[in-house]
Image: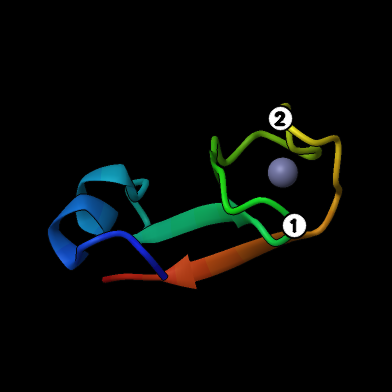
Amino acid sequence: MSLPAVVRQWLADENGLIYECRNCGTTLDPSDQICPVCGSSQIVEFDVS
Ligand SMILES: [Zn+2]
């Protein structure tokens, strides 16, 4: 939860969703199934709309 709200909204997709790795906190593309940084499949989805 380190990103300001304005950045979160900028990163969010058209549905107002943002995807983040639960393990390392990297913001991911909606199409990512696995974190490219740490390889974790634990992805959390935030609704910022
Ligand atoms: Zn990760």
Task: Tell me the element at label 1.
Answer: loop
Query: Which residue occupies the foreground of this view, 44 or 2?
Result: 2
Q: What is the quadrant of the C terminus in the image?
A: bottom left
Q: Is residue 34 left or right of residue 48?
A: right
Quadrant of the drawing holding the N terminus: bottom left
Residue drawn at point x = 65 percent, y = 65 percent = 44
Q: Where is residue 39 in the image (x, y as percent from the top left)?
A: 85, 35
Mark seen at residue 37: 2
- Give the percent coordinates (x, y) of residue 16: 33, 61
On residue 42, which mark appears? Answer: none
Residue 9 screen position, x and y as percent: 22, 56
Q: Distance between the residues labelled 2 and 1?
A: 10 Å
Q: Is the shortest distance between ligand 1 and the CB of mark 2 under 8 Å?
A: yes
Note whether ligand 1 is within 8 Å of mark 1: yes
Whether pointer 2 and pointer 1 mark residues with C-beta atoms closer than 8 Å, the reply is no
| Kind of residue indicated by mark 1 | Asn
Q: Mark 1 points at which residue?
A: 23
The residue carrying pointer 2 sits among few (fewer than 14), some (14 to 19) or many (20 or more) residues within 10 Å by Cα, namely few
Residue at 36%, 64% (x, y): give it. Answer: 2
- If the picture is divided into quarters, which one holds ligand 1? top right
- Tell me the element at label 2: loop
Q: Eyeballing the image, is 37 above or below 13?
A: above
